[in-house]
């Protein structure tokens, strides 16, 4: 449904833009039909276009702008495609590395509750490590910590 609505909005927006441009052209028809020529003089080279209507010049420069935009985005597309190719190769290498590491750890059970867990390390206010806390029951380790002397001052 969302794609259809997006398409309808896009069609409506383009219709609005085209109608607006046609309105501008219709209301300024005299300006667009005036015959003029462009001149280029570089000192050693001189060129003068034949008499053409302003509409032809507008359309020509508009099409040149579209071509310039297309080619600049085309180069970006090639660069993006190269980056995607490199990232896919890197992803494949990382997946292979993960598969190798998982194969090495083949004897470790998949159940996280039965896996080896690291015990937390208790630190004092100065940041010096102390003995590891027992990992048996968190509630009992909390009661042990609450009986500690808290009268130490930080220097």
Image (cartoon, grey):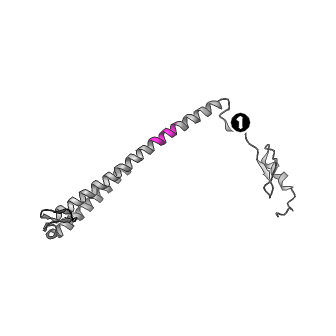
Q: In the image, residue 5 lies at what x, y percent?
A: 35, 53
117 vs 102, left or right, is: right
Is 130 one of the magenta-colored residues? no
Instruction: Characterize the local packing of mark 1: few (<14), some (14-19) or many (20 or more) Cα atoms within 10 angstroms.
Output: few
In the displayed orientation, state which residue is furthest to the front: 44
Q: Is residue 1 visible?
A: no
Q: Which type of secondary structure does the marked residue at label 1 adopt?
A: helix
The secondary structure that dominates the magenta segment is helix
Q: Is residue 50 visible?
A: yes
At a point 15% along the width and 66% down the height, the residue shown is 37
> Residue at image x 49%, y 38%?
89
Q: Which residue is mark 1?
A: 114
2 horizontally vs 43: left or right: right
Spot occupied by residue 35 in the image (x, y as percentages of width and height): 12, 67
Residue at image position (14%, 70%) is 30
Region of the chain picked out in magenta, as a range: 85-92
User: Residue 57: x and y, percent?
Assistant: 19, 62
Residue closest to the eye, 1 or 16: 16
Q: Any magenta on residue 87?
A: yes
**Residue 138 % position (x, y):** 78, 48
What residue do we see at 64% from left, 30% from top? 104
């Amino acid at each position: 449904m969302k794609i259809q609505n997006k398409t309808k909005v896009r069609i409506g927006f383009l219709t609005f833009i085209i109608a607006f441009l046609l309105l501008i052209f219709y209301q300024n028809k005299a300006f667009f039909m005036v015959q003029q020529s462009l001149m280029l003089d570089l000192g050693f080279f001189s060129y003068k276009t034949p008499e053409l209507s302003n509409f032809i010049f507008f359309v020509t420069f508009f099409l040149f702008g579209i071509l310039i935009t297309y080619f600049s985005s085309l180069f970006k597309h090639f660069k993006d495609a190269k980056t995607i190719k490199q990232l896919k190769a890197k992803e494949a290498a990382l997946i292979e590395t993960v598969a190798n590491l998982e194969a090495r750890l083949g004897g470790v059970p998949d159940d996280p509750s039965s896996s080896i867990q690291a015990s937390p390390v208790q630190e004092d206010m100065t940041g010096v490590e102390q003995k590891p806390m027992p990992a048996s029951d968190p509630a009992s380790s909390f009661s042990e910590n609450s009986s500690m002397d808290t009268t130490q001052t930080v220097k």
